[in-house]
Image: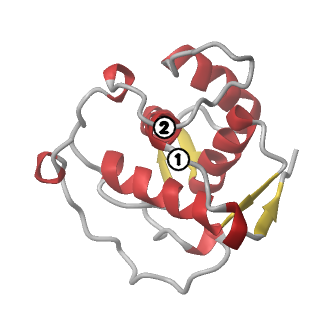
Amino acid sequence: MASDALPRTTPAEGTPPAGDARRQAPQEPFDTEPVPDVWRMPSRGIEWCDCGQHHDVDRKIVLDFAEAAVEDREWMTHDEVVDTAMDLWNYESVCEFFFMAIRRSASAVNGGPARKYRFERGLEIVAYFSKSWQGCPEEICSVVREHRG
């Protein structure tokens, strides 16, 4: 996906300090143009399902996980994006590499991370993440967030 094919927006606030994922996004949601269809994007990451068979990450799968994590079906907060991705991947805890990949996915799909996204855009961020996640380098990885559910 060409980086210049996606709209770029500027956050309402400056970039906050590294650390807690909730501080990694500006207050206001981005209002961007539609992005290339992430649902048709090929998976180039590791398998999200550990059953031994390949399962495409489609909208229904992401929606099923999001419905358990999201309070408002119009909006998805950045934390709900993180929670949905953690649930989909069945992660009990995640590291900074996970958060960096979520932020990179938000940048690719939304033009940048935000405190909240339109619900459909949040689903697309989780899908992009899941189709591109390469895992973390375990030897330098340390837990920064435990599962909330």
How many neighbours does mark 1 have within 10 angstroms: few (below 14), some (14-19), or many (20 or more)? some
| Label 1 sits on residue | 134
Three-letter code for the amino acid on which mark 2 is drawn: Gly
| Label 2 sits on residue | 45
| Residue found at x 45% / y 41% | 132
What x and y, as percent, mark residue 14?
39, 84
In this picture, is 104 found above or below 69?
A: below
| Residue found at x 53% / y 35% | 74
How many neighbours does mark 2 have within 10 angstroms: few (below 14), some (14-19), or many (20 or more)? some
As drawn, the label of residue 90 is: none
Q: Distance of mark 1 from mark 2, alpha carbons?
A: 5 Å
The reply to whether discs 1 and 2 touch (Cβ–Cβ < 8 Å) is yes
Q: Secondary structure at mark 2?
A: loop
| Residue found at x 65% / y 47% | 80
> In this image, 33 relative to 83: left or right?
left
Name the residue nearer the viewer: 69 or 58. 58
Q: Secondary structure at mark 1?
A: loop
| Residue found at x 67% / y 20% | 64
Name the residue nearer the viewer: 135 or 119. 135
Residue lying farthest to the right in this orientation: 149
Q: Quick one: quadrant of the C terminus?
A: top right
Q: Which mark sits nearer the N-terminus, 1 or 2?
A: 2
In this picture, is 69 found above or below 146?
A: above
What x and y, as percent, mark residue 77?
59, 51
